[in-house]
Each structure stands twice: as structure tokens, then as C-alpha cells.
Image (spheres, rainbow, N blue to C red):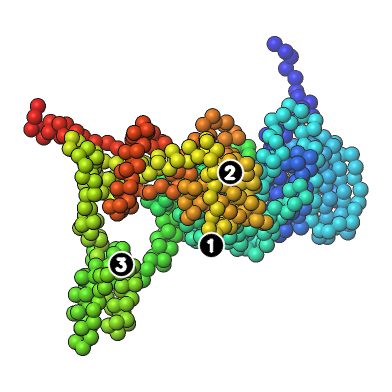
């Protein structure tokens, strides 16, 4: 075995650097945290080429005294901790005193800094850990750190870096998260000479979200503010419509620090249960504040994993905080239909007005002379609210208590159901159950069709045919749709434009973080277009990481699924008839399950049923 040796300072520094400064975003994180600790109210971050060639952080914080600038770069040099006990009470971002030492070991660093009471500032330049220049310099109060040519002296580590745009993405992600954690600090982020976003520092989280995620997000936020047993949960959750197919839009801070905690994401998702579709994840920016002794953030060198002393308690409080936010909003947004004072329980659903009951009720409460008014016009179908309003107006009542029936009259659908096909072999529709399955029968069998699976498959087949036969599958939208995205979404859509075009979309840059959609594949539902485009762009990003052979089919499937008839939707007879015809058509062509592999129909033959009822053996 080789002789045991003490590592040289340069080797030891490089190893340590690998832990603290493993990539440009980690360097930016350390430098921005230092700026925050220095009390800055304005922090500018600039990078070039993913931060590999250039990183600059400028703050207006307290600055470093001239005679201490070299000390700051020594390992274990910190102004934030001197006793080991401090470790447990630390309220600042950094405290291990190794960030600057590590960063300067693997790059060229320039520091310009001035304190409030210093007469002049100082310029210091270090190359791979050694001071090479130090001169007085006139400058504003605060600190500028420039890090150049990261890892130029550690080629092995250099190889681990991803391409510039990916590294820049990490930096953007990090800076935006820090900006979200401190709405009171004005941040700006510039990449390759272009300002990507800037926040005002006015202390309002909503304004930071507006800058980072765009208007759609800023408009759909629910405030969270809840405290219990010394644990305070604050921030915002997005209304269910902001939910996405991955968790990249979930931001959690513990005592001001951005952390990842998988269980907490789950807690938030649990709180949203039944409010959004399976596979969707809520948007949130949530901050947990609790006594520092109860949290150990230093378990991971990059300090993004967090552990709580009493996990269950924290999760319970977080769950209630989010539930509260959701309920408060739902209560506020519920339509204000007056409910009868006596028969208020069980709480009526505001879905369907039973005209007969309304009539009866009004007949009971309106003045005698107005009783000859015809209340319900059966000839033209009207929305329940309209009927109600008209009734109230006609009868001269400003406000009344209307009984609203929970379920629509069942027979309505049944009455329409005059079987049209009566040829022997062709299946007939019997009805619809659970608003999801169509019941059909022939002379020999009965079967159920899953309406969503069937429609999705049908759309998928049409799209696939158009796509692979290069038929025109784009269709101009009647009114072009402007999508306000956030900068990452925009970037991702623009990077994948050719894929979008091939799938039949016509999308163009619309300035700022917006794109304009002029055309979409024939089958794409306009109302769901935004969701669809974002889902596709997520999938395209994913595809870059893990190339998949059948990506086209997956994408077509997503388009097919988006506009397809949903489960839990009552269908009219002609709609069911139409779907049945198409299912039969598809079956003739040998297509028998939805693109996810779920069956489209299941059934029993007459004989099978007879056996089940033990009529025959
Ligand atoms: P730590 O942050 O853990 O103390 P660092 O290596 O990150 O260690 O920084 C060392 C010291 O340099 C800090 O304790 C602080 O005193 C000083 N320092 C670093 N950056 C700044 C800054 N932007 N403004 C003022 N002081 C700074
Ligand atoms: Mg630090």
C-alpha cells in the first residue's frame, strides 16, 4: 500500500471545493447567501456561458473591511460563528466559513468591496487560491464578487458540467427561488447580457411570483397563513388550475432557506386531494418558520435537504394550513344562491334548478295577484340561473329562498333514448351509467363502453394517421391564443419549436415571456391548449434526457387525451350513438384498447349471464 501522506493544501482545497462549488449554481448560491447575510437590499446576479466563464454578484450590503479581505478567503474563516454552540442557533445562511475558500481554489476571483465607514474600497484578485493583486479602489458601499473560469484547473470536474444552457437553467432556478424567499430584497438576474427577470423588493410575494412565473400565476394564488405550536406556515398555494405534471414549481423554505423535502410535497398534494387530477402537482411557495433547534438543515453539504425534530407535527400543521387556504377560497367563490332557512340541511348543491319545485315555492310565497304569471318556459332550454333570475323578476321578488334540487331529473336522458338502429346484429344503446360508461346490447351480448377511453383512442387513431401520412394536421385557431408563460416555460417551448410544428402546432414568439398560438392539431381542444402545450414541452425536455423511440406516439396520445370526452360527463343519445359507431368502426380495423392499454369495452354474452344467474349450467 502507498505511504500515508497529508494532502497538500491545494489538493485538499480542490476536494473541498468539489463539495461546496460543484457547479455554477452552487457558487451563485453561496455568493448570494453571503450577500443576504451582509444585509443587502439589492442583489444583482449576472452569468455568462452558464456561469462557467463568468459569474458576478453585486450587493449593497455591509461590505468587508479592507484589512479582512484576505481572511475571508481562508478556510474556516467566518464572521458568523465562533462557538460550537452557535451551530445550533444559527440564523444566517452560511456559517461553515468555507465557501469563499473553496470557490477561489478552483477559479479566478475578483472582489471589490467597501464598508460604510471605510474611506475607500479595495480590489482583490485571487488565482486558484493565491492572492495576486490587491489595490485600493473607489467604489460604492457593498460587495461585488466576480468568479471567472470555474474549474479551469480541475479538468475532471469540468467534464461533469452540463451544457451552458442547462447550467444557466440551474442558476435561473436557484436565483428565482432565493428571490421568492426574500420578497423584501430586489434581485435581478442577467444571463449572457440579457436581463431574465428582476424583482422590486417591495416585500410582496405576489409581485415576485408575477415577475418569475407570469401573470397567470400571480392571478391564481391563495394566501396561506397558519400557526400552531410555534410553527408558522405562510406563503401561497396556486389554485388547482396551476397544477402541473411535475414538481418543479413547488418551492419550500424552512426558516428562510430553500429546501427540498419530499414528504412535504406529498403533504401539500394530499391537501389538494380531489381538487386536481391524478398525476398533477400543485403550485406553491410555502415558508415554514420554526425554532431553529427543531430543524437540522446541515445534514447535506449543499444544505437543501432538511430534517425536522418532530416531523409529524410539522406535516400536520402544513396540511391544515393548505386545507384552510383552499376552503377559505372555495367558500368565497361559491355562487351566492340563497338557501331556504328551514330546509337548509342537507346542504343543497347548486347544480340544477328543478323548475317544478321553484314554481311550487314561488306559488307559496308570491302575492296572490301575480300568481297567473307563467314561470317556466319549457320550450327553450335555459341555464338554471337564467330561469331563476327571470322568475324573480317576473314575480317582483328581489330575493327569495329557492330550493335547489341536488340531482337532475334522471328520466330526461332516458326519454331521448329512442333506439335508432334496429337492424338485427348492430348493437343498440341501452343507456349510460355513472356518467362514464355506455351500456349497449345485441341479441347475444351486452357490453359497456368506457366513453373517455373510446374517444381518446378514436382521436389518437385520427391524429396518428394524419401525422405519419404527413397530412395537414394543423388547423388555424379562430382567435389566436396568447399564452403568458414564465421564462423557463417560454424557453422550453421555444427550444422545442420544431417538434411542436411537426405535431401540428403553429407557435410564435410574442415578446416578453409570451408566445402566440395560431394553429393547433385538428383534435386539440382550445380550452385545454395551454395545459397541453406545457405538458408537451415538459415531455420534450424529458425526451432529451432519456431519448424514447415512441416519443411521437406519446405526444399524439397527449393531444388525443386532452380534448377527449371526459369520464363523469352525461352524454346525449346522439353523442353516445356517434361514439358507438366509431368504436364499431375501430374494432373492424382491429383497434381495441385506449392508447394507455386500457380496454375500451367489456361485456358478457347472454350465455355468460345466464350461467351467472344459474339459469343454465
Ligand atoms: P461563511 O458565509 O460560512 O461565513 P464564506 O466563506 O461564505 O463563509 O464567507 C466568509 C466571510 O466573508 C463571511 O463570514 C463574511 O464575513 C465575509 N463575506 C463574504 N461575502 C460577503 C459579502 N457579500 N458581504 C460582506 N461580507 C462578506
Ligand atoms: Mg457563506
Question: Which residue does the numbered mark 2 point to in the structure image?
Answer: 500
* The quadrant where residue 183 appears: bottom right
In the rendered image, the residue lying farthest to the front is 423
Residue at 21% in and 71% down: 357
- Camera-near label (2 vs 3) is 3
Rendered location of residue 492, percent (x, y)? 62, 45
- Camera-near label (1 vs 3) is 3
Q: Which mark is residue 381?
A: 3
Residue at 47% in and 47% down: 523
- Alpha-carbon distance for marks 2 and 1? 28 Å
Q: Is mark 1 within 8 Å of ligand 1?
A: no
Count the marks.
3
Relative to 595, is 371 on the left or the right?
left
Judge whether residue 222 can be spotted in this image. Answer: yes
Rendered location of residue 17, percent (x, y)? 72, 34
Q: Which mark is residue 615?
A: none
The one nearer the camera, 284 or 309, is: 284
Q: Earlier in the sequence, mark 1 or mark 3?
A: 1
Q: Earlier in the sequence, mark 2 or mark 1?
A: 1
**Is residue 210 placed above or below 387 in the rendered structure?**
above
Q: Quadrant of the image for the C terminus? A: top left
**Is residue 377 placed above or below 61 in the rendered structure?**
below
Circle 1 crowding by C-alpha within 10 Å: few under 14, some 14–19, many from 20: few
Relative to 419, is 336 on the left or the right?
right
Rendered location of residue 104, percent (x, y)? 79, 38
Question: Which residue does the numbered mark 1 point to in the structure image?
Answer: 219
**In the rendered structure, are the residues bearing label 2 and label 1 in contact, judged by CB atoms less than 8 Å apart?**
no
- Alpha-carbon distance for marks 2 and 3? 41 Å
Q: Secondary structure at mark 1?
A: helix
**In the rendered structure, are the residues bearing label 2 and label 3 in contact, judged by CB atoms less than 8 Å apart?**
no
The one nearer the camera, 363 or 132, is: 363
Q: Quadrant of the image for the N terminus? A: top right
Amino acid at each position: 500500500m502507498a505511504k500515508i501522506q497529508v494532502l497538500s493544501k491545494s489538493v485538499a482545497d480542490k476536494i473541498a471545493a468539489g463539495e461546496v462549488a460543484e457547479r455554477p449554481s452552487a457558487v451563485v448560491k453561496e455568493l448570494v447567501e453571503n450577500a443576504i447575510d451582509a444585509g443587502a437590499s439589492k442583489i444583482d446576479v449576472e452569468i455568462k456561458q452558464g456561469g462557467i466563464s463568468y459569474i458576478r454578484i453585486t450587493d449593497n450590503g455591509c461590505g468587508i473591511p479592507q484589512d479582512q479581505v484576505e481572511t475571508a478567503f481562508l478556510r474556516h474563516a467566518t464572521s458568523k460563528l465562533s462557538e460550537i454552540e452557535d451551530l445550533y442557533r444559527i440564523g444566517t445562511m452560511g456559517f461553515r466559513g468555507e465557501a469563499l475558500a473553496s470557490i477561489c481554489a478552483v477559479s479566478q476571483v475578483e472582489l471589490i468591496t467597501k464598508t460604510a465607514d471605510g474611506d475607500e474600497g479595495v480590489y482583490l484578485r485571487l488565482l486558484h487560491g493565491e492572492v495576486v493583486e490587491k489595490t485600493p479602489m473607489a467604489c460604492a458601499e457593498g460587495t461585488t464578487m466576480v468568479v471567472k473560469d470555474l474549474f479551469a484547473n480541475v479538468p475532471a470536474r469540468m467534464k461533469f458540467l452540463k451544457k451552458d444552457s442547462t447550467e444557466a437553467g440551474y442558476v435561473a432556478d436557484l436565483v428565482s427561488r432565493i428571490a421568492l424567499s426574500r420578497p423584501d430584497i430586489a434581485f435581478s438576474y442577467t444571463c449572457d447580457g440579457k436581463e431574465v427577470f428582476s424583482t422590486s423588493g417591495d416585500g410582496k410575494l405576489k409581485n415576485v411570483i408575477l415577475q418569475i412565473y407570469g401573470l397567470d400565476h400571480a392571478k391564481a394564488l391563495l394566501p396561506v397563513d397558519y400557526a400552531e405550536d410555534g410553527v408558522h406556515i405562510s406563503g401561497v398555494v396556486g389554485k388547482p388550475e396551476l397544477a402541473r405534471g411535475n414538481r418543479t414549481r413547488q418551492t419550500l423554505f424552512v426558516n428562510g432557506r430553500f429546501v427540498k423535502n419530499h414528504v412535504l410535497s406529498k403533504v401539500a398534494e394530499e391537501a389538494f386531494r380531489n381538487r386536481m387530477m391524478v398525476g398533477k402537482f400543485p403550485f406553491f411557495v410555502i415558508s415554514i418558520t420554526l425554532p431553529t433547534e427543531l430543524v437540522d438543515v446541515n445534514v447535506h453539504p449543499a444544505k437543501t435537504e432538511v430534517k425536522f425534530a418532530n416531523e409529524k407535527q410539522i406535516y400536520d400543521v402544513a396540511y391544515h394550513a393548505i386545507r384552510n387556504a383552499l376552503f377559505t377560497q372555495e367558500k368565497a367563490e361559491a355562487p351566492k344562491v340563497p338557501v331556504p332557512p328551514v330546509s337548509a340541511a342537507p346542504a343543497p348543491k347548486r347544480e340544477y334548478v328543478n323548475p317544478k319545485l321553484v314554481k311550487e315555492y314561488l306559488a307559496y310565497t308570491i302575492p296572490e295577484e301575480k300568481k297567473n304569471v307563467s314561470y317556466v318556459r319549457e320550450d327553450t332550454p335555459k341555464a338554471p340561473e337564467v330561469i331563476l333570475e327571470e322568475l324573480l323578476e317576473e314575480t317582483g321578488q328581489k330575493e327569495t329562498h329557492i330550493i335547489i334540487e341536488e340531482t337532475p331529473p334522471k328520466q330526461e336522458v332516458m326519454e331521448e333514448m329512442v333506439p335508432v338502429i334496429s337492424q338485427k346484429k348492430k348493437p343498440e344503446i341501452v343507456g349510460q351509467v355513472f356518467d362514464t360508461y355506455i351500456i349497449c346490447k345485441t341479441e347475444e351480448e351486452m357490453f359497456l363502453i368506457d366513453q373517455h377511453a373510446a374517444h381518446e383512442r378514436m382521436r389518437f387513431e385520427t391524429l396518428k394517421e394524419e401525422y405519419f401520412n404527413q397530412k395537414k394536421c394543423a388547423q388555424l385557431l379562430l382567435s389566436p391564443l396568447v399564452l403568458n408563460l414564465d421564462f423557463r416555460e417560454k424557453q422550453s417551448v421555444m427550444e422545442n419549436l420544431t417538434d411542436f410544428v411537426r405535431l401540428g402546432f403553429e407557435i410564435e414568439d410574442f415578446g416578453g415571456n409570451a408566445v402566440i398560438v395560431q394553429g393547433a392539431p385538428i383534435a386539440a381542444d382550445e380550452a385545454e391548449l395551454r395545459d397541453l402545450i406545457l405538458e408537451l414541452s415538459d415531455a420534450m425536455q424529458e425526451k432529451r434526457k432519456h431519448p424514447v423511440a415512441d416519443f411521437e406516439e406519446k405526444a399524439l396520445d397527449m393531444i388525443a387525451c386532452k380534448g377527449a370526452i371526459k369520464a363523469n360527463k352525461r352524454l346525449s343519445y346522439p353523442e353516445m350513438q356517434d361514439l358507438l359507431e366509431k368504436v364499431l368502426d375501430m374494432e373492424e380495423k382491429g383497434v381495441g384498447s385506449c392508447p394507455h392499454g386500457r380496454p375500451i369495452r367489456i361485456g358478457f354474452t347472454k350465455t355468460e349471464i345466464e350461467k351467472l344467474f344459474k339459469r343454465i349450467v
